[in-house]
Image (tube, coloured by chain):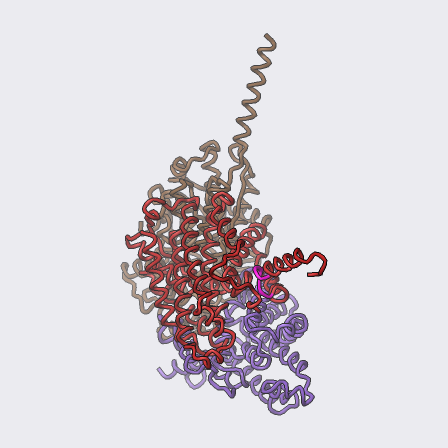
Chain colours: A purple, B red, C brown
């Protein structure tokens, strides 16, 4: 009983960590630029396809393909920020929703064109597959890998936000953009870099997620609900909110499916609605 | 989006354009006789979009779960017909009641919070109902769909035929009547107060308006309309699939309304027409790449179109009228 | 005199031209397919299967040129109904065909009855479909038809304790019900069952449940595509195979088109189905060659393409026997009991139910000489009907 509970918790945490990695960019974008980016899933998808290409066509090892996915998604984010997103910062949320849905459609169609509508094959390397027994609980190695990477990145991001100059600029820009600008912080540049990093992380998450979530052109629309969920429940001021929200949602989803599979799917939606109604500003919020 | 730039229709003076619009639709039996099924579905989508305009355009709630009420209405009409009562108008009535009740109950969850929260809550409601429909397959037919709907002839005389003639006439009549009602409502003090709430809820509260109650009333009414649209679809196709509740349907609905233009009453109908007709033709050419150009078009609308196709038409018409009135001066 | 004969000749010639002109009117086949949305590859497979048939057997039959009119349902049944209506009233098709998804077929069925148009279901697999209209003939398969033999085979081979996992929708529930029925009737024991939500990306918790229940085998039905891939990953990740739990499933799990995406995971999985790309026959070789010519090598042909191929074969045969004059009732008479030499093996359309009667093969996933994965047939059940009709 306990071992299965621990196993479920472990799986849930890993799944949640994956969701966090993909969604953190969305949270920061919303908090920083007040921008609802429904195309966020497309950047994750891009990372996934880069990883698949890297492994199959360019012969890169998995651990090299991951940073490649990050870089290319970040570059894509940078490009799109200049071409499209910066014109939409001042617009209403509705305009943003619409434009990013449009962008998502284009991404899906492009993916379908280049890769076909079916699932993409991906083989993770031997050393990351299989199980290992820890204290009597069978733990999946790939999930453990997800947890480790997630934890490392979370620490890195927190350090970057709290200990570096740039991080300070980001925090300032989130809290009071006009004052920050007046103080000489180039808010526009902060936006650009932060957005790019957010997209890069999404791409990395997408690449890591192929093994868990699968990859096909419909990916952005299929999972955007989960990403938005993390952001809505977690709030947009800082990293802790989305992290806890993602981990919580991951565990509830997995536990629900394990213990009560008949209503597994309901639980996550019902929980979300309840949480949002009780705390519309998110789990952890300073605003 | 700046819908206050759009013309405010008054109740006493009906613009010629509106009369012509409905006459053209009525003449559909002669203008597009081989496309009546498509035209019926355009009307139904237009009615659905009209209901959504109330939520999005007039009250400013960004929702991606409006299909929930459409679906409830569709299933209500479907289940009624399947169990032997195939009279069409009673199906509409039942659908209105069920969808309205659902809308009323969920409105309490929806009218709080900011944009993102409401977006998520409405999406969540839609997804929950979708799962519910799949789960209660004994009633809804589940994923396979609700079969066995037997529709009695409309008004006892007009049987639903395979050319879609009766379906078109029926959908047109229902849409027209509901539209007229909405028109009155939107120009009434209630409707004006809704616009006030959208633009500045704080001030409306300060003025003493029961903002909360108004929003709930509006949301309930919007779900009634959506439910009737859903019932129309069920009755004219004699089938209900779980897709009537799907996220895709809600997302497509939003696209249709935006394409047409919000807050102008006709935007939903125009948007539905443009979207579905374009889809029909582009799908025929290359079904797989419709999505790409739709996406590009959406971005273009946001960047340049501002208030949708209808808004652009109105601006053009006004510019033309000004130029006609002042031939020497510029537009 | 000459004048008289000339007139006769002229009128005779005109009559002949008129006759051939009306016979020249193309034989229109309206294909109602999912070409966009989540099931786009269903439509693609079927369209390519039909075109492959035309490549090999020509595009003319009984003096009429065959015209395929493909319409996209976008995966939505009311659109399917609408495009079918247009195909019947505007394009005036002679046959309705295709139908990758059950809801599409169910929505169009009343139309086929009203218009008296033969409706060839090339894929949709829920039992109830053929009961919805006397004008429906199915050339694909039904879930119960494929599942019952699997249960029988399992018991024959010493598997008595099974855990079932199916996708929570029509075909999944059909498969689960049939498996349970056949399995328990012959003495088997179901130690647990679970229905997974349609939108489930994460199979880990479900697979974990199965592992904890320690059955001898797990019976799985999941729609071909992302669900199947997701499950297989979960199965091998959790090392259920190493724990001695066998995996038996309907062929949807190891469907020829997507099996490549699963890596080594499916090796050794036992499935039952009516068609495998590895089937050794001349017809199959012809089919596969033509498919590659029409569709390229991006994705392998699968049972849906074969369904379309055989559907076209049925249509051609009907057209031939009716000399190009397609009448709904007469067409159905020919379709009932029609024998088709299919790439899958023998195929007969049941005259009583209009469902396919065919051989269900038991296959194992193996890696063959060309390095690719195949469902290799090693046992079979002949002349299997849908067990519920």
Q: Is residue C100 left or right of residue C3?
A: left
Residue B65 inside the magenta-drawn segment: no
- Which percent across, then down, holds residue A21? 55, 79
Nearest the eye: B245 or A11: B245
Residue B310 inside the magenta-drawn segment: yes
Residue at (52, 31) in percent of width and height: C23
- Which percent across, then down, holds residue A241? 50, 84
Write the start and end of the magenta stretch as one range: B306-311
Residue at (46, 75) in percent of width and height: B118
Quadrant hosting residue A237:
bottom right
Quadrant hosting residue C183:
bottom left
Q: Is residue B35 placed above or below C263 in the rendered structure? A: above
Residue at (57, 11) in percent of width and height: C4
Most extreme residue toward the top is C1
Most extreme residue toward the bottom is A163
Q: Is residue C50 left or right of residue C379?
A: right
Nearest the eye: B98 or A258: B98
């Amino acid at each position: 009983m306990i071992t299965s509970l621990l196993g479920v918790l472990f799986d849930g945490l890993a799944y949640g960590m994956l969701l966090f990695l993909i969604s953190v960019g969305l949270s920061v974008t919303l908090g920083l630029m007040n921008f609802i980016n429904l195309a966020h899933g497309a950047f994750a998808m891009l990372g996934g396809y880069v990883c698949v290409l890297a492994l199959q066509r360019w012969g890169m090892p998995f651990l090299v393909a991951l940073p490649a996915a990050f870089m290319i998604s970040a570059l894509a984010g940078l490009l799109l920020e200049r071409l499209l997103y910066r014109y939409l910062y001042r617009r209403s949320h509705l305009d943003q929703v619409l434009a990013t849905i449009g962008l998502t459609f284009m991404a899906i169609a492009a993916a379908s064109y280049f890769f076909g509508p079916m699932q993409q094959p991906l083989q993770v390397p031997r050393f990351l597959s299989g199980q290992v027994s820890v204290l009597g609980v069978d733990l999946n190695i790939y999930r453990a890998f997800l947890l480790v990477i997630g934890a490392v990145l979370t620490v890195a991001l927190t350090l970057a936000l709290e200990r570096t100059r740039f991080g300070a600029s980001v925090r300032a820009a989130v809290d009071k953009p006009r004052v920050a600008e007046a103080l000489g912080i180039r808010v526009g540049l902060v936006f650009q870099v932060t957005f790019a990093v957010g997209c890069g992380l999404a791409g990395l998450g997408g690449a890591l997620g192929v093994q868990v979530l699968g990859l096909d052109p419909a990916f952005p629309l299929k999972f955007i609900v989960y990403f938005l969920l993390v952001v809505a429940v977690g709030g947009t001021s800082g990293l802790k909110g989305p992290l806890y929200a993602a981990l919580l949602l991951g565990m509830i989803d997995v536990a629900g499916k394990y213990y009560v599979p008949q209503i597994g799917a309901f639980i996550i939606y019902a929980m979300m609605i309840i949480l949002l109604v009780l705390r519309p500003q998110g789990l952890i919020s300073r605003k | 989006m700046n819908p206050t730039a759009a013309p405010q229709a008054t109740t006493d003076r009906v613009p010629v354009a509106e009369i012509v619009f409905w006459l053209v639709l009525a003449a559909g039996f002669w203008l597009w006789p081989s496309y009546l099924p498509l035209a019926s579905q355009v009307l139904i989508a237009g009615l659905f979009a009209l209901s959504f305009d109330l939520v999005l355009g007039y009250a400013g709630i960004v929702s991606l779960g409006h299909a929930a009420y459409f679906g409830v209405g569709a299933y209500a009409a479907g289940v009624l017909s399947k169990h032997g009562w195939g009279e069409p108008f009673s199906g509409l009535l039942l659908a209105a009641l069920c969808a309205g009740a659902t809308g009323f109950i969920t409105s309490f969850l929806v009218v709080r919070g900011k944009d993102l929260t409401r977006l998520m809550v409405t999406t969540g409601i839609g997804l929950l109902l979708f799962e519910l429909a799949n789960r209660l397959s004994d009633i809804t037919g589940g994923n396979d769909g609700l079969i066995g709907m037997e529709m009695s002839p409309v008004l006892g005389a007009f049987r639903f035929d395979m050319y879609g003639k009766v379906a078109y006439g029926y959908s047109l009549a229902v849409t027209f009547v509901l539209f007229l009602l909405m028109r009155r409502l939107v120009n009434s003090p209630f409707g004006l107060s809704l616009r006030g709430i959208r633009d500045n809820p704080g001030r409306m509260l300060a003025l003493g308006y029961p903002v909360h109650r108004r929003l709930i009333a509006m949301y309930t009414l919007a779900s009634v309309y959506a439910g009737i649209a859903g019932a129309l679809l069920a009755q004219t196709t004699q089938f209900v699939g779980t897709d009537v509740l799907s996220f895709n349907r809600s997302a497509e609905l939003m696209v249709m309304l935006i394409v047409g233009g919000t807050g102008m009453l006709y935007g939903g109908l125009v948007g539905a027409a443009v979207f579905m007709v374009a889809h029909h033709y582009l799908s025929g050419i290359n079904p797989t790449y419709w999505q790409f150009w739709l996406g590009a078009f959406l971005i273009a609308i946001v960047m340049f179109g501002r208030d949708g196709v209808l808004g652009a038409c109105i601006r053009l018409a006004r510019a033309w009228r000004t130029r006609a009135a002042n031939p020497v001066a510029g537009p | 005199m000459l004048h008289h004969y000339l007139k006769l000749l002229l009128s005779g010639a005109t009559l002949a031209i008129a006759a051939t002109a009306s016979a020249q009117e193309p034989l229109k086949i309206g294909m109602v397919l999912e070409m966009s949305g989540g099931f786009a590859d269903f439509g693609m497979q079927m369209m390519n299967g039909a075109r492959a048939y035309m490549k090999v057997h020509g595009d003319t039959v009984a003096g009429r040129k065959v015209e395929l009119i493909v319409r996209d349902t976008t995966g939505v049944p009311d659109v399917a109904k609408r495009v079918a209506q247009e195909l019947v009233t505007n394009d005036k098709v002679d046959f309705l065909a295709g139908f990758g998804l059950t809801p599409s077929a169910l929505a169009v069925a009343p139309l086929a009855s009203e218009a008296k148009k033969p409706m060839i279901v090339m894929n949709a697999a829920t039992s109830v479909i053929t009961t919805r209209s006397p004008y429906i003939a199915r050339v694909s398969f039904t879930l119960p038809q494929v599942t019952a033999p699997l249960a029988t085979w399992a018991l024959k081979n010493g598997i008595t304790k099974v855990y079932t996992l199916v996708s929570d929708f029509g075909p999944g529930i059909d498969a689960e019900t049939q498996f349970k029925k056949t399995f328990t009737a012959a003495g088997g024991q179901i130690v647990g069952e679970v229905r997974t939500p349609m939108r489930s990306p994460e199979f880990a918790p479900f697979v974990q449940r199965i592992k904890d229940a320690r059955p001898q085998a797990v019976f799985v039905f999941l729609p071909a595509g992302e669900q199947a891939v997701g499950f297989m990953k979960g199965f091998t990740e959790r090392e259920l195979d190493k724990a001695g739990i066998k995996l038996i499933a309907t062929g949807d799990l190891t469907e020829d088109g997507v099996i490549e995406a699963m890596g080594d995971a499916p090796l050794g999985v036992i499935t039952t189905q009516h068609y495998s790309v590895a089937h050794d026959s001349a017809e199959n070789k012809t089919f596969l060659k033509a498919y590659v010519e029409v569709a390229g090598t991006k994705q392998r042909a699968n049972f849906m393409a074969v369904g379309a191929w055989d559907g076209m074969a049925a249509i051609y045969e009907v057209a031939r026997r009716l000399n190009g004059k397609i009448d709904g009732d007469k067409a159905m008479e020919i379709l009932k009991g029609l024998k088709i030499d299919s790439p899958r093996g023998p195929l007969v359309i049941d005259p009583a139910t209009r469902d396919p009667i065919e051989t269900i093969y038991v296959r194992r996933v193996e890696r063959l000489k060309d390095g690719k994965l195949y469902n290799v047939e090693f046992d079979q059940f002949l002349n299997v009907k849908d067990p519920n009709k």
